[in-house]
Amino acid sequence: MQGICASVLCVCICVSALLRSAISQSHIKTYTNTECTDGYHWDPLTEHCKDINECETIPDACKGEMKCFNHYGGYLCLPRSASVIPAPEPSITPTPAFNPCPPGYEPHGDSCVDIDECERDEHDCQPSQQCTNTLGAFNCQCPRGYSKVGTECIDIDECRFRYCQHRCVNVPGSFSCQCEPGFQVGGNNRSCVDVNECEMGAPCSQRCFNTYGTFMCRCDQGYELGPDGFTCNDIDECRSSSYHCQFRCVNEPGKFSCVCPEGYQLVGTRMCQDINECETGEHQCSDTQTCVNIHGRYQCVDANRCQEPYVHNSDNVCVCPNNKPACKDLPYSVVHRYMTITSERSAPSDIFLIQTTSFLTGSFNTFRIRSGDDNRDFYIRQTNNYSAMLVLARAVSGPREYTLDLEMLSIHPVLSHRSRSVLRLSVFVGPYTF
């Protein structure tokens, strides 16, 4: 101890030696019970023996000019000018508790139970792996859809194996099948089946026909498919042709109808026919008048149209008696007749037959248009000695009315007999070609 008092350096060396001695002794200061060597006491928190600081627990541990320095298991009294450099306190490695069970198990009462390393996070599986607990151990496995390459789990591209009928989309750990437009994934999630768009609200405005992978829109009669392929537009049949109706075409949704002018009626679906008001009783002629049917209308004429010096002989026949001086240079008889023709009738066309009802044997008869044909729209073609034909020379347009006096001259050369009679023909030209 004289070396300690001699110099500070010597004290440091000696203290270091003492500390090393104390450290070497501290290795035996770890117990599994509460019995510790002198200079140590049991610490229940760390469950180890802990050094007692005698400089604090022993009053006046050092006398005089000495200073108390604590060290492992005891203390030192050194001059106040001495410096002590303590060695670092060695780390205490806890001694694991005794485990009587095999690895991967732990005691539980009188038996050993398996340790779930996966639940306790005591495994060394990679983040891409799944930990599976086993009895006494654990396994690191790749999830479904992944394969182990080295220590990592790599996604399997299932699309390489052509699982899907149409299109395959790879996703991490799996894949999905997709179908082309007009198809949907079948019950096995791989095949593609046709979609019946007609049952799923296809945008056809009228009729829908399902086909493989798509659908077609069709229209009812009288409609046509629009540019969008879905909408049905009405066909204006009246615009497409002028031959649908004889008079006028009326377009309707999906169809058309024909109408006729006033005084005509529809025959069938497109033809127009004149209504004979004189036969149907739809006229308003009086009892003293005669109803004359005309194309598209009718006309009421007096039953007795005879003018002086003519007298009424019978229906439509006026006679000028020979005993009347005024009748000397006049035709003996005037017969009133009426007829109607259509507008723009083809010409030449025979329209009226003129025939004498009585004549003397041996007489010669001639026929001519006496008046009413200023434009020469008609001419007479005599067919034999007692008849002739009135011919329409050119097409005429109506409505228009002609009053033609057709004269028949009868001459008997032997008897020196000469007589004349007139057929007063009223020709009504209708306003239409039908």
Image: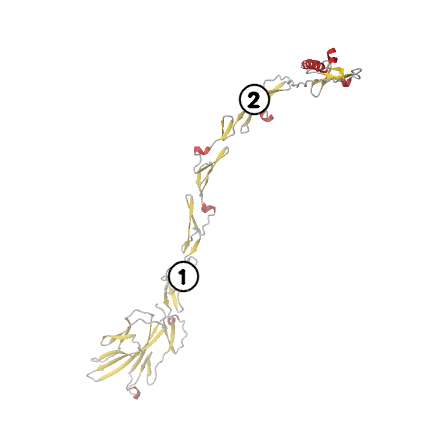
Side of 357 where 185 appears, left or right = right
Q: How many labels, in total? A: 2
Graded by Cα atoms within 10 Å as few (under 14), some (14 to 19) or many (20 or more), the crowding at tag 1 reads some
Circle 1: element type: strand
**Quadrant including the N terminus:** top right
Q: Residue at x 42, y 45 (%)?
A: 214
Location of residue 5 by image quarter: top right
- Nearest to the observer: residue 112 or residue 167: 167
- Nearest to the observer: residue 189 or residue 35: 35
The answer to whether one can see residue 1 in this image is no
In the rendered structure, which amino acid carries the disc numbered 1? Ser
Cα separation, mark 1 vs mark 2, equals 93 Å
Q: Where is mark 1, residue-wise?
A: 257
- Nearest to the observer: residue 135 or residue 419: 135
- Nearest to the observer: residue 203 or residue 256: 203
Graded by Cα atoms within 10 Å as few (under 14), some (14 to 19) or many (20 or more), the crowding at tag 2 reads some
Q: Residue at x 60, y 25 (%)?
A: 120
Q: How is the image coloured?
A: secondary structure
Percent x, y of residue 390: 28, 74
Side of 122 where 228 appears, left or right = left
> In the orientation shown, which residue stands out farthest toward the top?
2
> In the orientation shown, which residue stands out farthest toward the front?
7
Circle 2: element type: strand
Q: Where is mark 2, residue-wise?
A: 137
